[in-house]
Amino acid sequence: MRELLRLLDAKMSFAQNGVPAGRRIQMAQNATMNSLSNTKPLSGAIALVTGGSRGIGRAIALRLARLGAGVAICGRDSDALVATEAELKNSASPVFSQIADVSKSTDVTALVDKTQAALGPISILVNNAGIGLFGPAHEKTEADWDRVLNTNLKSVFLVSRTVAPAMIKRGSGDIINISSLAGRNAFAGGGIYCASKWGLQGLSACMAEDLREHGIRVSVICPGSVATEFSTRGSKDPAKVLSPDDVAHAVEMIVTQSSQSFLSEIHLRPVRKP
Ligand SMILES: NC(=O)c1ccc[n+]([C@@H]2O[C@H](COP(=O)([O-])OP(=O)(O)OC[C@H]3O[C@@H](n4cnc5c(N)ncnc54)[C@H](OP(=O)(O)O)[C@@H]3O)[C@@H](O)[C@H]2O)c1
């Protein structure tokens, strides 16, 4: 065992140049223990990813399942849900999908109840479902405003307040809200969308303060343009936009962070400017 650790440490010190030797031994021990016990980092965790049927949510759901979590997804379109559920089943993790409109409280209650009945208590909530609507706010209708604000902001309130009480009882959990750099910036034609995402920033920061004393970490991810069906705005050059998997990687970083600390906000940009 000691010789195996020495070899692993030598191997890891190449990749972890600059990491102190003691820490490398610890990492080597963790790697050894993981390979001996064959457990994945999120084994036993249960994640609910809203809007997990397509785009960024799909990439997050697949990543969490690969890391060993049981995963539930929701959306309004059943064909997309069925297709992604089939992909998730390849991971060997438990999977559940449910048609739900997260802007409606009755759908949200049913979604959370059925998820917990199928998979167990939710330990990771990713509030991802969202829609884009662009153009000058003064040209938009009241129905446009309601649709965007209800989907991008009210839904986070509805789903989080349904999931949080059980997390509080357990004294742990991760709530990750997918916002946008549009939640930090202003641009022409962004009025209604920016209002929803700036609102989400405020909600997320206050939820983080309310829940941290209960051991629950509330994080927000603000991606720039991501290559999905979401919007016709921005660059179409794949080298100048993020991929859904880039956002999934940020979620992985958050949920694998050591339990006494949390990444409260991540700004994610493509290296090359769109
Ligand atoms: N793509 C970007 O450039 C970008 C950049 C920054 C942030 N974001 C944010 O990332 C999140 C995901 O965006 P995306 O690019 O992956 O969009 P997408 O490809 O259009 O996927 C959106 C997902 O949300 C679901 N959804 C929408 N409204 C819903 C509702 N009322 N109830 C339940 N599910 C709903 C959709 O399923 P159904 O349509 O079947 O309901 C779909 O699964 C959004 O919050 C968006 O604001 C996107």
Image (spheres, grey):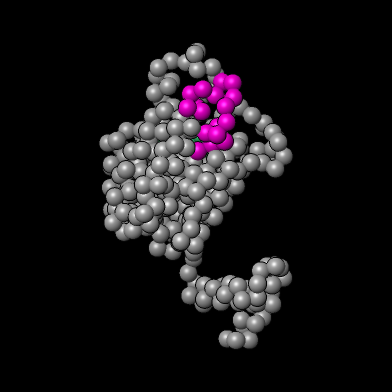
For the point 41% across and 38% down, the residue is 203
Residue 181's spot in the image, x, y percent? Answer: 57, 36
For the point 29% across and 35% down, the residue is 105
Please say whether residue 49 is visible from this viewpoint.
Answer: no
Q: Image quadrant for the C terminus? A: top right
Q: Residue furthest top?
A: 139
Residue 75's spot in the image, x, y percent? Answer: 41, 38
Q: Residue furthest bottom?
A: 2
Q: How many marks?
A: 0
Question: Of residues 207 and 225, which is closer to you in this image?
Answer: 207
Question: Of residues 2 and 244, which is closer to you in this image?
Answer: 2
Q: Is residue 87 above or below residue 1?
A: above
For the point 40% across and 17% down, the residue is 142
Residue 172, quarter of the rendered image: bottom left
Residue 79, quarter of the rendered image: top left
Q: Which residues are magenta?
A: 179-195
Q: Image quadrant for the N terminus? A: bottom right
Residue 161's spot in the image, x, y percent? Answer: 32, 43
Please say whether residue 246 is visible from this viewpoint.
Answer: yes
For the point 36% across and 47% down, the residue is 210
Question: Of residues 57 and 149, which is closer to you in this image?
Answer: 149
Residue 190 in the magenta stretch? The answer is yes
Residue 240 in the magenta stretch? The answer is no
**Residue 170 vs residue 49: left or right?**
left
**Residue 9 vs residue 103: left or right?**
right
Q: Is residue 230 above or below residue 24?
A: above
